[in-house]
Amino acid sequence: MAGHVITIAQQKGGSGKTTIAVNLAVHYSRSGKSVALLDTDPQGSLGRWFMTRHAGLGGDTGLEFGTASAWGVAYECDKLRRQHDLVIVDTPPKIDADLRPALRAADLVLIPVATSQVDLWATEGVLDLARRESTPAMIVLNRLAPRARLAGTVNAEIDAMEVPRAAAALGNRVGFAEALGQGLAAAELARSGPAAREVAALAAEIAAALAD
């Protein structure tokens, strides 16, 4: 049976797509899943993370990694999903025709949103494209600051969009950035820390959505 493809997309730069991709990938891998990462962003942040991980862990990354141009995504996803339980696709921060193949190939699109109106406005283009491709989407609150004043407003506006929002949110934690720079996931720095618990909760929600 072919594995599932998760595409992470958001037109606003700095939304945390790569952070979410690597933390979910490592979590699922450590949970016994076979996981591949696919980088379609020319900036190559995911690739740099993977090579840092490869060097730091002596090649034992626990993951497969590949790259693709926008129009090579369908071929790469089809190949990787035949070999792995999960394929996680990181995309560039833009909304145009080049993004559509990554959305079309996905079983679920994750859209990171920080607690700001700018981030929320930036979701509209991704949601529109995902709907055109008939691909389910889920909004993930990322870099959530403690007691953020805007959180309630943003949540209400997301609910009005009639798109699923993950109950689990990722906090604005230094551990995510520290781990990324070392080629690791936050849970590998602090196995039982709050970042690890947040990722685990999000991963469980995503798994449930894919199982529906």
Image (cartoon, rainbow, N blue to C red):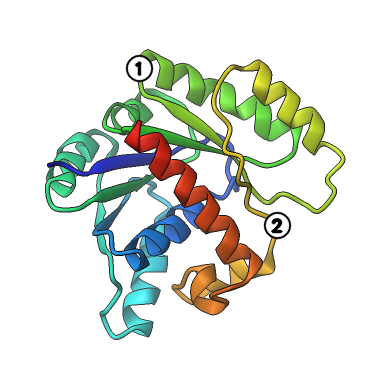
User: Which mark, by number, is residue 172?
Assistant: 2
Q: Label 1 vs label 2: CA separation?
A: 32 Å
- Left or right of 205 in this view: 61: left
- How packed mark 2 is, by other alpha carbons closer than 10 Å (few <14, some 14-19, many 20 or more), is some
174 w.r.t. 108: above or below:
below
Q: Amino acid at mark 2?
A: Asn
Residue 42 spot, x, y in % from top left: 38, 49
32 w.r.t. 108: above or below:
below
- Left or right of 109 in this view: 36: left
The kind of secondary structure element at disc 2 is loop
Residue 15 spot, x, y in % from top left: 59, 45
The kind of secondary structure element at disc 1 is loop
Residue at the location (54% across, 27% down)? 164
Q: Which residue is mark 1?
A: 134
Q: Quadrant of the C terminus?
A: top left
Q: Earlier in the sequence, mark 1 or mark 2?
A: 1
Residue 174 spot, x, y in % from top left: 68, 68
Residue at the location (60% across, 67% down)? 177
Residue at the location (48% across, 43% down)? 205
Dividing the picture into quarters, in which one does residue 175 lie?
A: bottom right
Residue 123 spot, x, y in % from top left: 58, 27
Q: Amino acid at mark 1?
A: Ser
